[in-house]
Image: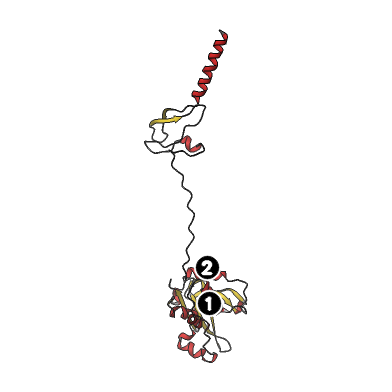
Amino acid sequence: MKSAILILALLSSLLLSASASEPYTAPWRCEKCDQFYDRTFYGGGKKPTPYRCPNCNALTGDAKKDEPSGEDPEREPVSEPTKPKKKVLYKGSSEALLDRMYKIDADTTYAEMDCTKFVAKALELAGFDMTESVRKRIFMNDVSADDIRTYVDAGSKKIRGVAGALVESGQATNVASGKIKPGDVVQYWYETKSGSMRGHAGIVEKSYGDGVVDLYGSHKSKGGVGTLKKLDLSDMTKAWIARPSN
C-alpha cells in the first residue's frame, strides 16, 4: 500500500513539473494606460514574453528592464544607429580645394615648390581641369620681367595668375575684396622697397572681412608651405580674387 502511494506521489510530481514549463495566459495591467489585457506567462519563474499593449502600444515595464535574449516576433525591431554621412567633396569646388591643399606636404620648401606651383598642385588634387592654357596663365611664363609693371598698371589678363586662369576657363567667378570666403584663390602684386614689382598667389584659409585674409600656400618669407596671417589685400598694388563656381 505504501509503495503504491509513493508511486502515485512520484507520478504527480512529474506531471506538475511538466505542466510548470507550459505557457499560460493571465490578465495583465498596462502601466501606462491602466487597461487589462492577456499576456503569456511561463512556469518556473520565467519572465512573460515582452510585447506592446494593444490599447496604447506601450512596451511593458518589465520587458524594458529585462528582455529575454533571442528574437521575439511580437517585439518591434531595434534600428541600428545612423552613421553620420561623409561630406561629399565635389571636384573643382572650394570645399575640395580647402581639403586637398592640406594634402601637400607641409614640410615642402619654397625652393621645391613656389607659390604658383603650390596652387597648381592643389587645384589638380581638387579635381580642377588643369589644361595647358590654365597652367600657362597660372605660371605666367610668357610675361617678361620688364613688362610686369606695365601689365599690372593696365590690369592685363596676362598677370592675373590663378584667379584669371580659373575665371577664363569657366571654373571660377571674380570676387570683390569685401566678399572673400575660404577656398577663394588669390593673385596679387605689390611694390618692393627697391621699386620692383613682385607677385604672389595662394588660397584663402580664413577671411576677416574688408580684404583681410589668412592665405595658405608656399611663401618665400616662410621658407615654404604655411599660412600668411591677416594679410591685407587692400594694401597691394593690384589683387585678383576668384571663387570656384562648382
- Disc 2 designates what residue? 99
Q: Which mark is residue 120?
A: 1
Q: Nearer the viewer, mark 2 or mark 1?
A: 1
- Left or right: 88 with respect to 114? left
The quarter of the displayed image where residue 9 is located: top right
Percent from the top left, x then y, of residue 173?
A: 42, 76
SS of the residue at dot 2? helix
Q: Residue at x 44, y 30 (%)?
A: 40
In this view, the residue farthest toward the bottom is: 146
In this view, the residue farthest toward the left is: 55
Percent from the top left, x then y, of residue 29?
A: 41, 31
Q: CA distance from mark 2 to mark 1?
A: 14 Å
Q: Is residue 71 above or below residue 151?
A: above
Indicate the amino acid at tag 1: Ala
- Name the one closer to the observer, 200 or 77: 77
The quadrant of the image that shows the C terminus is bottom left
Q: Residue at x 54, y 92 (%)?
A: 146
Q: Residue at x 55, y 14 (%)?
A: 7
Number of other residues with Cα within 10 Å of mark 1, as a class: few under 14, some 14 to 19, many 20 or more: some
Percent from the top left, x then y, of residue 132?
A: 49, 81
